[in-house]
Amino acid sequence: MYSLLADLVVVLHFGFILFVIAGGLLALRWPRAAWLHLPAVAWGAGIELAGGICPLTPLEVKLRIMGGGTLQQGDFVARFLLPLIYPDKLTREIQMLLGLAVIVVNLAIYAWVLRHQRRRR
């Protein structure tokens, strides 16, 4: 049960990362989505720039330990999502670049969203 919950946390974590990176695109269709997305961007970029750890990470680790601490080799989460969320060679410099990339990508997305909304008017 705990391993399943840990997997669920990883999927949620991955979804949040995707939302932080590209959630601004939702504002093209639903402009109010920006009210949820911009704080998520601030959190995601802030965690990376400050060298912090997302609270979902220790939660996932604790659930894994409570579940016996083993992953199946063929497990989708272990093979595909975990390496994306927790890269092996993540350095402080790479973490800083990721934080800056989140900001730059989202500035570009919101510039596009604003331009698109101005054209609609």
Image: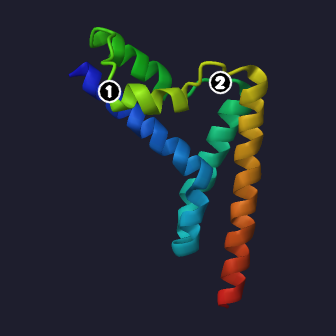
Residue 56 position within the rendered picture, expressed as x and y whole percent measured from the top left: 47, 28
How far across and down, in percent of the image, does residue 113 sit?
67, 71
Considering only vertical position in the picture, is 13 above or below 57?
A: below
Can you tell which mark lies on residue 75?
A: 1
In this rendering, which labeled residue sits more in front, label 1 or label 2?
A: 1
Question: Which residue is at a point 72% across and 28% down the rendered structure image?
Answer: 95
Q: Quadrant of the N terminus?
A: top left
Outermost residue toward the bottom in this view: 121
State the SS at label 1: loop
Gap in Å between the C-alphas at discs 1 and 2?
28 Å
Apparent side of residue 67 relative to residue 19 in the rendered image (left or right):
left
- Residue occupying the point 38% across, 14% down: 62
Q: Please name the amino acid that badge 1 sits on.
A: Asp
Is 80 placed above or below 64 here?
below
User: Residue lying farthest left?
Assistant: 1
- The residue tagged 2 is 52
Is 81 displayed left or right of 84 in the figure?
Answer: left
Residue 102 occupies which quadrant of the picture? top right
Residue 87 placement (x, y as % from top left): 59, 24
Q: Secondary structure at mark 2?
A: loop
Classed neighbour count for the residue bearing mark 1: other residues with Cα under 10 Å, few (<14), some (14–19), many (≥20) = few
- The front one of 90 and 39 is 90
Task: Identify the mark nearer the N-term, 1 or 2.
Answer: 2
Choose top left, top right, bottom left or bottom right for residue 17: top right
Q: Which mark is residue 109?
A: none
32 horizontally vs 38: left or right: left
Q: Give, as a three-letter code, the residue at label 2.
A: Gly
Q: How was this image coloured?
A: rainbow
